[in-house]
Amino acid sequence: MIVASMTPAAVELAWEIRREIEARHDEADRLRLRAIDRARFDADLAQRRFMLVDPSNRLVADTLEQEWNKKLRILADAREQRERSQQQERLILDDAIRDRLIAMTADFKTLWRDSSLANRERKRLLAYIVEDVTLVKLPDEGTTKIHVRFKAGKTETLTAQNPKTSAQQVKTKPEVLELIDKLLDDHTCSQIAQLLNDRGIRPGGCVRPGKSDIRFDALRVSYNAQRNGLRSRRDRLRDRGMLTKLEAAARLGIHEATLTRWVEYGLVKRHAYNDYAFLYEIPDSHPPVKHSSRWDRLTDRATAARESAASKTL
């Protein structure tokens, strides 16, 4: 912003403003001169009145003398005020100074962008340009208003995002949490971690120094889900009617070991909710029943089930 403000056009504008200010100063000085002339006239008039009074009339003489002194004080104050105002006014800028100011804009940009320039020197440059800076922090909006006032009176307002705390910097992004929530419907935490890593998505903690190589794992995915109130995969499967091993065996009237064999042959589907635990899906229509394996082997039943499923898809 500072470099953008230091342009020849800005100097030309400041030059025109300065001329207007000088014209106003001249007008004010003419008014002050008129006040001095008026005060001088009143003082001379009071002097002539005092000089014409009869000295034997002391009461009138004292009154006229006091009036004369009062007019003299007014004249002295008017002169002092004009001198003080002239001292406070800036020096008149001539064309040579204007040309030097325009040339300084290019020099300033070159100097400011010099990588060898120390920051303390940049601060000294700013001290010659900027009058003051006011910061207004808006916590509810997460922003800070920066009001910059230049020496010439111009003001600029900038809006900046508030810096994040260390906890906010390592927090998982909302879009990543949304993706995890969606993937939990069909994948375990370890599978989700692999999918996120394959897509190049990294945990929030990778922004810490020396942690840029960390990746998602099952524990990290599970922690993010629990920390942010996402429903676990087990709860999602239970809502879809999945049963535990004990419940599924009881529903089918078989032993748990038999249920395991039926899963191996595809008669019953199971869905993992972590790397070592499963829930079982029992079909609502035509669930498998226990037969004598001697007359109705599992391999034959599995083949028939696959053929039936294939015919339904066609």
Image: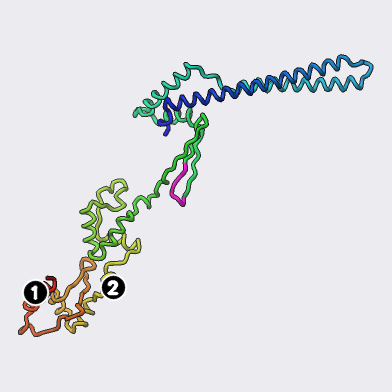
Residue bearing mark 1: 307
Q: The disc labelled 1 sits on which kind of residue?
A: Glu
Q: Position of residue 72 (x, y in %)?
A: 77, 20
Q: Secondary structure at mark 1?
A: helix
Residue 286 image position (x, y, % from top left)? 16, 81
Question: Residue 290 lies in what quarter of the image?
Answer: bottom left
Q: Which residue is mark 2?
A: 239
* Amino acid under disc 2: Asp
Q: How many marks?
A: 2
Please state if 56 lies on the left or on the right of 117 as rendered: right
Mark 2 vs mark 1, CA separation in Å? 29 Å
Query: Who's the residue at 10% across and 73% down the image?
Result: 311
Q: Is residue 13 magenta?
A: no
Q: Residues within 10 Å of mark 1 (few under 14, many from 20)?
A: few
As drawn, which residue projects farthest toward the right?
56
Residue 90, label in figure: none
Residue at image point 47% right, 48% down: 138
Establish if 130 lies above or below 212.
Answer: above
Foreground: 301 or 220? 301
Of labels 2 and 1, the one closer to you: 1
Q: Is residue 142 magenta-colored?
A: yes
Placement of the C terminus among the 4 image quadrants: bottom left
**Residue lying at 50% horizontally and 24% vertically, measured from the top left:** 16
* Disc nearer the start of the sequence (2/1): 2
Residue interval drawn in magenta: 139-145
How is the structure coloured here? rainbow
In the shown orientation, is residue 149 left or right of residue 307?
A: right
Compare residues 308 and 61 and report the one nearer the observer: 308
